[in-house]
Image: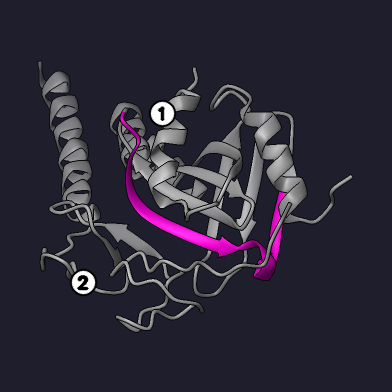
């Protein structure tokens, strides 16, 4: 079920690192359209609705480095990067993160660079562990 | 170990220097940015054209929304045809 292999993710992240920057954790997540829109599309017609939801779903690779929290919007099997967001860990905006049974939700409340995505535990090998460590680091709840 | 070190290389022009704002192109080095489809250069998302090659950015919704509408119209037509048969 894993969307990308670890090597592919590291390969996608590496060009956006600064010299001396080290990846600590990385994870794969998605942002689906509004739930109301999903229900509406599915009620109209199931198959076109499912295709529409898939088309409107954004895929993300996030990386926690020693300096930054990097968000890469990716596309396709080769994890082609479409967009880059970055947050300085020393000046991190308020973060809401929680891990449930299946998903880890991460929301960054930044007016200029808002980000929200959910990360399935099976999204990648060890996606859950990485997400929990990212959650702990961003919410400063380190043990 | 976490260090409070601002990025030193501008992702847009490659200029090196301290601070969050580039001394070369005067852009915010940490601004959200997209990758140009034509030349792969990084351009601030707020700018409509690639700063390197001038390629116009086109939103993906521009083709996705018509495709989704067409799918629903096709599904409706197919369901009507099935009812008539």
Q: Tell me if residue A6 comes above or below residue B65 in the rendering.
A: above
Q: Position of residue A134 (x, y in %)?
A: 68, 45
Query: Along the horizontal axis of the image, is B47 left or right of A50?
Result: left
Q: How many marks?
A: 2
Q: Examine the image and state in which quarter residue B9 appears.
A: bottom left
Real-space Cα separation, disc 2 to disc 1, in angstroms? 29 Å
Q: Residue at x 31, y 66 (%)?
A: B14
Numbered label attached to residue A8: 1
A96 falls in the magenta region: yes
Question: What residue range appears in magenta?
Answer: A78-97
Q: Nearer the viewer, residue A50 or B6?
A: B6
Q: Main secondary structure of the magenta part?
A: strand
Residue A83 in the image, given as x and y percentages of width and height:
35, 54
Residue sitting at x 31%, y 30%: A78
Crowding near the residue tagged with mark 1, few <14, some 14–19, many ≥20 C-alpha atoms within 10 Å: few
Q: Chain of mark 2?
A: B
Instruction: In this rendered view, identify the residue nearer to me: B40 or A100.
Output: B40
Residue A40 showing in the rendered view: no
Indicate whether residue A45 is drawn in magenta. Answer: no
In the orientation shown, which residue stands out farthest toward the right?
A: A143
Q: Are the residues under marks 2 and 1 on the same chain?
A: no
- Relative to A111, say whether A59 is above or below: above
Q: Is there a contact, CB below 8 Å, between mark 2 and mark 1? A: no
Above or below — where is B29 with respect to A44?
Answer: below
Residue at horizontal 40 percent and vertical 48 percent from the top: A73
Residue B16, percent from left and from top: 39, 71
Q: Which mark is residue B48?
A: 2
Give me the residue at 61% from left, 29% from top. A127
Taking the image as drawn, is residue A13 in sight?
yes
Task: Identify the element where label 2 is drawn.
Answer: loop
């Amino acid at each position: 079920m894993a969307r990308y292999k670890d090597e592919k993710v590291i390969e996608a992240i590496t060009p956006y690192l600064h010299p001396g920057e080290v990846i600590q954790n990385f994870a794969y997540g998605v942002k689906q359209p509004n739930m109301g829109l999903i229900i509406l599309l599915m009620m109209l017609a199931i198959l076109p609705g499912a295709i529409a939801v898939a088309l409107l779903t954004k895929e993300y690779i996030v990386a926690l480095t020693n300096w930054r929290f990097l968000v890469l919007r990716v596309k396709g099997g080769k994890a082609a990067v479409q967009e880059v967001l970055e947050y300085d860990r020393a000046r991190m905006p308020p973060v809401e993160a929680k891990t449930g049974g299946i998903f880890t939700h991460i929301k960054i409340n930044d007016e200029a660079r808002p980000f929200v995505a959910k990360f399935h535990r099976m999204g990648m090998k060890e996606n859950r562990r990485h997400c929990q460590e990212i959650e702990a680091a961003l919410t400063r709840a380190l043990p | 170990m976490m260090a409070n070190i601002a990025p030193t290389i501008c992702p847009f022009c490659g200029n090196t220097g301290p601070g969050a704002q580039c001394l070369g192109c005067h852009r915010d080095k940490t601004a959200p940015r997209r990758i140009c489809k034509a030349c792969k250069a990084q351009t601030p998302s707020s700018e409509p054209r690639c700063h390197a090659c001038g390629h116009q950015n086109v939103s993906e919704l521009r083709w996705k929304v018509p495709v989704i509408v067409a799918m629903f119209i096709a599904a409706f037509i197919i369901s009507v045809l099935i009812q008539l048969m």
